[in-house]
Image: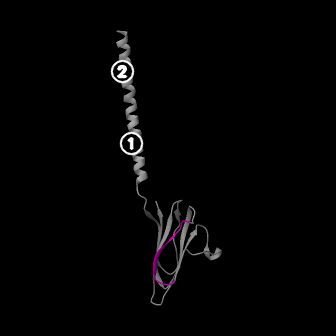
Amino acid sequence: MKKIYAWGWTLIASVALTACGGPAASTTNGENTETAAAEETPKQWTEVARLTGSGDKKSDVFTLGKGKSRLRYDFKAGQFGGMLGVYVVEEGVDIMRSGGIPEVMVNESEEGESSLSHLSAGNYYLNVMGVNGKWTVIVEEFK
């Protein structure tokens, strides 16, 4: 009788451990599945800043992360040509005082993009200089 009694407690303990470990294991598996699903979500280009106009304009400050980023532009020159210069400037810097190299410089109607991968994570603004034309400039991050 003692053997059956001991065997019964072993069975009860085994069932109890399985029952306690079961939900935890399935919760962990559920979390792993959710994490894997989040990692499998395809990345896409996400707009960070947009500026549209003619003539010269500066954007509000925007933040770039560590990932890939790009600048897209569309310039429609006037009847006698035009010019567009697009600068991505670190917050607090004035290119009229310190100078700078444009990300894009065109002198006729053009649509295109330029990589901003050389920029480190931080705060920036757009400084667009346009003559005789209309333009749109967009900064995007791949996330």
User: Per the image, is 112 magenta?
Assistant: yes
Furthest residue in direction bottom, as rendered? 80
- Magenta span: 107-117
Residue ID for mark 1 = 30
Horizontally, residue 138 falls left or right of residue 7, namely: right
Looking at this view, is 139 or 126 the one in front? Answer: 139
User: Per the image, is 114 magenta?
Assistant: yes
Dot placed on the residue nearer the N-terminal end, 2 or 1: 2
Are there few (<14), some (14-19), or many (20+) residues within 10 Å of tag 1? Answer: few
Amino acid on which the number 1 mark rests in the picture? Gly
Q: Position of residue 90 (x, y in %)?
A: 59, 67
Which residue is found at the position 47% from the left and 90% from the top? 80
Asked where in the image residue 117 lies, by quadrant, the reply is: bottom right
Vertical arrangement, residue 20 with respect to residue 42, above or below = above
- Callout 1 secondary element: helix
Residue ID for mark 2 = 11
Horizontally, residue 55 falls left or right of residue 98, namely: left
Amino acid on which the number 2 mark rests in the picture? Leu
Q: Position of residue 122 (x, y in %)?
A: 56, 62
Q: Are marks 2 and 1 in contact (CB under 8 Å)?
A: no
Front disc: 2 or 1: 2
Looking at this view, is 4 or 74 the one in front? Answer: 4
Quadrant location, the N terminus: top left
Q: Position of residue 71 (x, y in %)?
A: 49, 70
State the CA–CA distance, disc 2 to disc 1: 28 Å
Task: Inspect this view and state whether residue 11 appears.
Answer: yes
- Callout 2 secondary element: helix
Which residue is found at the position 41% from the left and 51% from the top? 38
